[in-house]
Amino acid sequence: MLADMAAEFAAAAGVSRASFYRLFGSREALVEALDLQLEPGARERILDAALTLIGEAKTAGADYVLTPEMTNIMEVKRERLFATIVEEDADTSLATLRELARKLGIYIHVGSLAIKLTADRAANRSFLIDAQGDIVAKYDKIHLFDIDLPNGESIRESNAYRPGGRTVIAETPWGRLGMTVCYDVRFPQLYRMLAQAGADFLSVPSVFTVPTGKAHWEVLLRSRAIENGAFLFAPAQTGEHTAGRKSYGHSLIVDPWGEVLAEGGEGVGIITAKIDPARIAKVRGGLPSLRHDRDFTSPELAPRRLAAE
């Protein structure tokens, strides 16, 4: 009943998918991940939709909620972006989500927000908010997406955003969370570092393009989970945004063995999966590759034998 209500509201509000999954450990928790479809001028409406879905999830017992990358805006035009975004302390989306976390007594992980740093530079910043409404961790996306796609689409995230330089692991009541964002997923060394530092769960809130999503989305996420023996949560935006930009959607929940526990499609819907944190120790114990890393030298090109030799 709750799932049907949430899906109906999401469809009416332009929210494309709400994904729910459950963690089982020393403390049971219900976790929610939202897929959003942001449209021009729709910030307030989409925030209202997300708040409603979070409230529905809390009614069902949710303790942790995860939203996609760029929860507050999807704007490809640099001028319009900087005319809209504000500094962290002035961002109403963040303030509203902090108050909601406090009111409901849940963790809200904001996949990322566009946060103004200077007049011409922003941060793609992820926030973890605890049940008291306090920001307990922040992560600025390290790897920025600059690409020319075969379909003619050109994206230059570095034209507007400043890359982060810090890796971040956050303590939660259910284990340690390694925070990343979208394009980071193509850099496995980041996830290895997080896992070796104790991350049990890896978050990859995203806005994947359709061409790269169809070709690489699932295999990249499953690979990061397998390599590190960690659960991976990847909520994603979906559908059409500004200037014809389309996002792939297809949220995934992956277990430490690389099994896809749940996958969202391109439309409105709810996905569920049972997650047992004890499986992390079981997988890592049976395949302890995190303990088998070795130092080695930088590669050197082997000299060719001379013909006379």
Image: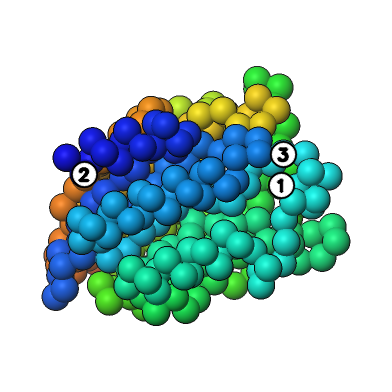
How far apart are labels 1 and 3 at the CA level? 9 Å
Mark 3 → mark 2, Cα distance in angstroms: 35 Å
Q: How is the image coloured?
A: rainbow
Secondary element under disc 1, as helix, strand or loop, is: helix
Percent of width and height locating residue 246: 57, 28
Label 3 or label 2, whichever lies nearer to me, is 2
> Which disc number belongs to residue 76?
3
Lateral position of residue 12 relative to residue 259, left or right:
right
Mark closer to the observer (1, 3)? 3
* Mark 1 or mark 2, whichever is nearer to me: 2
Most foreground residue, 130 or 13: 13
User: Which is nearer the N-term, disc 3 or disc 2?
Assistant: 2
Question: Does 160 appear above or below 176?
Answer: above
Q: Which residue is mark 2?
A: 2
Say whether residue 268 is left or right of residue 73. Answer: left
* Residue 258 in view (yes/no): no
Q: Position of residue 169 (x, y in %)?
A: 44, 74
* First reached walking from the N terminus: tag 1 or tag 2: 2
For badge 1, the amino acid type reads Glu
Instruction: Please tell me which residue lies in front, 97 or 67.
Output: 97
Outermost residue toward the top in this view: 151
Query: What's the residue type where badge 3 is placed?
Result: Val
Q: What residue did someone put label 1 on?
A: 157
Q: Residue at left 23%, top 57%?
A: 59
Q: Position of residue 216 (x, y in %)?
A: 46, 35
CA distance separating discs 1 and 2: 38 Å
Amino acid type assigned to the residue bearing label 2 in the image? Leu
Sooner in the amino-acid sequence: mark 1 or mark 3: 3
Residue at left offset 57%, top offset 47%: 44
